[in-house]
Image: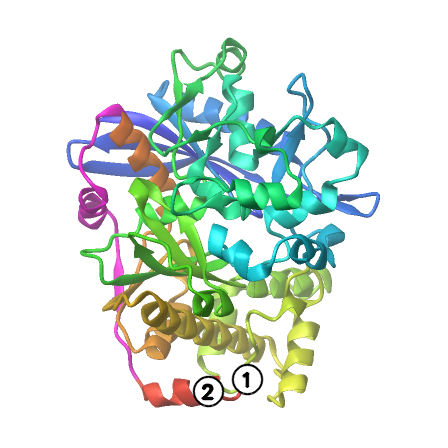
């Protein structure tokens, strides 16, 4: 058994986890957790990336105290956001948050330069106003962008600070709407159409490739004993989470359930049809040449923002009690479209959900329990639609749905998802992204061997899982979908 460290940066918190892998053993424990709190300055919402980096250093120090110096470190995070560096490799301001309003109206500029159908045919990425390509167009013309010589996605920026070596990991690069998923290379056609310099991003890396080693400065700061290499993993957290899906065979759908829910299937090749584009499915590259064919669903953000709102009003709620209350509310009482852009920004989520119910002619939730039931049912209905559409568009049948990430702990959500999809749901592991991160590091180091199927077998043998079977009338969910506006 050898020690590895996974840095997993999420939209609301960052974590550093220490793992042991080898000899049929796969364990993970949290060494350090820190808050990831966006900061609004001068009307712009930023990530506090220096605070995140300090949290990573603290985590490496803590991991070293627990298990000694690791063999390697791997980094994963959310997608699309980036930091700009000047000619000396110095960061030009804190990265802008994807929920910032700077991309409002930018889609018209993007599609004025490259046709939406052509953009999808070249990149396979769904339309989203916060995609990297929209952010780059929004930034162009600013003094900061004029001074920029490189753009580093968030996990690549942290890796650069740890090693002094710049690179772009391909699973996250594929989310930028600038990469061709067929070749795994940058799309010169898209970059030319948008007037973007192909040299803005450093060379591409594949998961499992070396990304450098911790610098002497980092070793001194963390107390680790070198050499400690940094290994490129599936640096988009969903890419690592899909590695961490304990599937047996290929006929599965997955839901990576956290702040966002990513719902889809794993394929060998992208689906670039016009029907796929209109269904807003995305083709993101995965580990070992796979494609994550999925749809973004708003996810547990809806519940998180409700709880934050109630807390600000001085009415803090217990999640356990809320879910118990929600379970007593009749199924499908109130529904909203979980993909409604009105839910994207932070703020008074209960009021916005109530307003959406009024617009759709749905009963307005009056208690926190009814509000949570509305969220859970609406998410499950969105999951059902994504699983059905993925099977149809990709011609890829599934027999089971795997829920990984924090949502795997939500027993009501897991059961209702099984009911909605009419399929068994296997919940767990909750630490799928960290486990997928660790497994790719361990395979690169020779501590484990084999294909994704072999790595997933180790997950099934070592991780606690829970199975849910569908109950109720599946026709109720088909009829419920007709209640929402197209």
Camera-side residue of 339 and 436? 339
Q: Which residue appears at 80% of the width and 32% of the height?
A: 143
Mark 1 residue element: loop
The C terminus sits in image quarter: bottom right
Question: For this view, does 49 lie left or right of residue 474?
Answer: right
Q: Callout 2 environment at 10 Å: few (<14), some (14 to 19), or many (20+)?
A: some
Colouring? rainbow
Q: Mark 1 points at which residue?
A: 484
- Image coordinates for residue 19, horizontal then vertical, percent: 32, 33
Q: Give the range drawn in magenta.
A: 445-471
> Decide: marks 1, 2 in contact (CB < 8 A)?
yes
Using the rendered image of the protein, determine whether residue 431 is visible from the camera's viewpoint. no
Q: Which sits in the foreground, 251 or 127?
A: 127
The vertical placement of 395 against 41, above or below, is below
Image position of 420 (left or right of 442): right
Residue 229 appears in which quarter of the rendering? top left
**Magenta stretch contains residue 17:** no
Residue 145 appears left or right of 467: right
Q: Residue at x 62, y 46 (%)?
A: 193
Q: Is mark 2 on a helix, strand or loop?
A: helix
Q: Can residue 62 be seen in this view?
A: yes
Screen quadrant of the N terminus: top left
Circle 1 packing at 10 Å, graded few (<14), some (14-19), many (20+), is some
> Residue 55 versus residue 204: which sits nearer the camera?
204
Residue at position x 47%, y 60% from top? 261
Q: Residue 94 in the image: x percent, y percent?
A: 70, 34
- For residue 240, what is the image quadrant? top left
Tell me, for residue 480, which label it has, or none.
2
Q: Nearer the viewer, residue 292 or 348?
A: 292
């Amino acid at each position: 058994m050898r020690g590895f460290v996974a840095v997993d940066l999420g939209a609301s918190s960052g974590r550093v986890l220490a793992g042991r892998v080898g000899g049929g053993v796969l364990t993970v424990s949290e060494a350090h957790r820190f808050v990831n709190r966006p900061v609004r300055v001068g009307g712009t919402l930023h990530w506090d990336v220096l605070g995140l980096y300090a949290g990573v250093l603290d985590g490496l120090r803590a991991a070293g105290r627990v298990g000694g110096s690791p063999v390697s470190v791997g980094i994963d995070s959310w997608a699309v956001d980036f930091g700009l560096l000047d000619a000396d490799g110095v960061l030009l301001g804190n990265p802008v948050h994807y929920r910032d309003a700077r991309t409002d109206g930018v889609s018209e500029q993007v599609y004025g330069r490259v046709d939406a159908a052509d953009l999808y045919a070249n990149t396979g990425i769904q339309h989203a106003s916060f995609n990297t390509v929209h952010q780059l167009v929004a930034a162009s013309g600013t003094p900061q962008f004029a001074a920029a010589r490189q753009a580093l996605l968030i996990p690549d920026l942290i890796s650069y600070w740890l090693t002094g070596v710049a690179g772009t990991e391909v699973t996250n690069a594929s989310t930028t709407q600038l990469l061709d998923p067929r070749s795994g290379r940058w799309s010169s056609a898209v970059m030319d159409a948008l007037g973007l310099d192909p040299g803005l991003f450093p060379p591409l890396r594949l998961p499992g490739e070396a990304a450098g080693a911790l610098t002497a400065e980092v070793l001194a700061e963390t107390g680790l004993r070198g050499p400690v290499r940094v290994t490129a993993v599936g640096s988009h957290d969903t890419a690592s989470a899909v590695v961490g899906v304990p599937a047996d065979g290929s006929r599965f759908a997955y839901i990576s359930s956290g702040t966002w829910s990513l719902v889809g299937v794993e394929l060998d090749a992208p689906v670039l049809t016009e029907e796929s584009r209109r269904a807003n499915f995305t083709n993101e590259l995965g580990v070992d040449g796979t494609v994550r064919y999925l749809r973004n669903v708003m996810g547990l953000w809806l519940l998180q923002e409700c709880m934050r709102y109630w807390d600000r009003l001085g009415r803090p709620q217990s999640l356990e009690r809320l879910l118990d209350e929600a379970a007593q509310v009749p199924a499908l009482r109130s529904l909203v479209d979980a993909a409604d852009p009105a839910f994207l920004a932070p703020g008074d989520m209960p009021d916005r959900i109530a307003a959406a119910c009024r617009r759709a002619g749905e009963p307005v939730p009056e208690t926190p329990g009814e509000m949570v039931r509305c969220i859970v049912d609406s998410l499950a209905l969105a999951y059902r639609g994504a699983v059905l559409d993925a099977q149809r568009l990709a011609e890829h049948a599934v027999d089971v749905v795997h829920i990984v990430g924090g949502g795997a702990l939500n027993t009501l959500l897991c059961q209702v998802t099984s009911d909605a999809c009419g399929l068994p749901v296997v919940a767990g592991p909750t630490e799928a992204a960290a486990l997928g991160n660790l497994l790719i590091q361990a395979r690169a180091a020779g501590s484990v061997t084999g294909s994704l199927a072999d790595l997933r077998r180790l997950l099934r043998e070592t991780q606690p899982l829970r199975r849910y079977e569908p109950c109720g009338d599946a026709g109720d969910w088909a009829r419920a979908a007709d209640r929402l506006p197209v």
